[in-house]
Image (cartoon, rainbow, N blue to C red):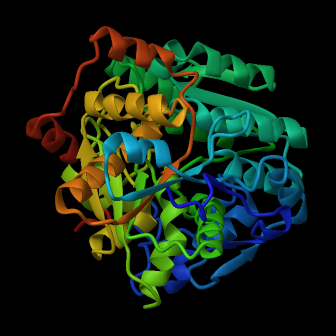
Amino acid sequence: MESKIPYKIYLTENEIPTQWYNVRADMKNKPAPLISPADGHPLTIEEMNPIFCEELNKQELDNTTAWFDIPEPVQQFYRMYRPSPLVRAYFLEKALDTPAKIYYKFEGNNTSGSHKLNSSIAQAYYAKAQGLKGVTTETGAGQWGTALSMACAYFGLDCKVFMVKVSYEQKPFRREVMRTYGANVIPSPSMTTEVGKKILADHPNTTGSLGCAISEAVEAAVTTPGYRYVLGSVLNQVLLHQSIIGLEAQKAMQKYDIKPDIIIGCAGGGSNLGGFASPFIGEILRGEANYRVIGVEPASCPSFTRGKYAYDFCDTGMICPLAKMYTLGSQFIPSANHAGGLRYHGMSPILSQLYHDGYFEARSVEQTAVFEAATQFARTEGILPAPESSHAIRVAIDEALKCKETGEAKTIAFNLTGTGYFDLVAYQRFNEGTMDDIIPSDMAIAESLQHLPKIGNE
């Protein structure tokens, strides 16, 4: 064991970053703009203001400002649970008998149980500063909804959460945490919105999806005075706020002259991978370093590895702006797998552009293999990981085992963004051997992609 590197590397409170990093400023090819579904013109701030908070819209559309100051009230809130540790996985390394060095950034040490608090508190702050009454959102597994409920309680905002129906039923305890913080939690699709009624009429037995829940949350926001819609992933502003993860990781590594070879994050909408990898990718873009970056997605919802790079609706109800991204089609309803936070049909426009330009690779993994990795990690490192984060664990283990075969002592770093203590139904099914691997057929994906909008894709 290398005694000079501790198990957990902490920054001091004074070392917490005071600025967010905007990777778009260093991208040669900028992400394609959000466009109107009516005629394809790039959306302006004025057109977006009825949906999102005004200051967040400025962040969303900014392709040139590399650093954004973190507001002092947000910095104060961050100090409640940040800095988060960079952990050397000595026990996992020993169990794998690998020469690889494995590190993980642990973001689950707060009541919300995940990294989502990094962006929810920022978005709630800007909503409060604008004088709004409340916000609406969607949530998959519930981490984002929990984080937003906490943030809204802190700033005295109303919070309405549309929770994907399958997660609402599978994860009742996370739902109750949201309600404890004062949120109104509604299973989606629901009969409380017009788009929800339509989705239920077309798919009466649907278990829901993030795309469905987004449609309902947006409708609820634009039809309720004093409310705006906020989103926990995908958007440029979210990756901006989440960059604090990678920035802290860089500082921690610099303390002990750690130079990672491989950077890994799970990929659903992009907040995990983007938040962790963006500062490192920035180094690549500026020619300062070179890393192998891997985005890991579920085989049941393989946007990167089997999707198409095209303009698509961000929601199933097709009421949102169009984003150019890797997508399976807005009408794609993934299987009711247990990685609820990764059940989104598309991907962050920033990450989509970077992937398209070859700055990182993507890999899809099956659910049972993910839970095998999660179980091994829990037994060796003492943390029960969230199903979403466990996708990154799976590939980190795979890469470490390759090092065992080749004898290479590579340094692997991954983002462990959440705990799985509210995901015990999933662990129960894995332990009982009743968990299935459901992979969409080529026909199912092709049928969904037939519904891609013509605008922007001619």
- Name the residue at 61% across, 75% down: 254
Q: Up-down: is 282 above or below 454?
A: below
- Name the residue at 39% across, 44% down: 94
Q: Position of residue 357 (x, y in %)?
A: 29, 76
Q: Position of residue 405 (x, y in %)?
A: 17, 55
Horizontal placement of 359 versus 158: left or right? left
Q: Up-down: is 25 above or below 224?
A: below
Quadrant in the picture for residue 355: bottom left
The residue closer to the viewer here, 153 or 373, is 373
Single out the residue that lies furthest toward the bottom. Answer: 287
- Name the residue at 40% across, 25% down: 338
The residue closer to the viewer here, 246 or 242, is 246
Q: Position of residue 175 (x, y in %)?
A: 64, 20
Callout count: 0
The residue closer to the viewer here, 14 or 168, is 14
Q: Up-down: is 223 above or below 107?
A: above
Asked if residue 307 shows in the view, the reply is: no
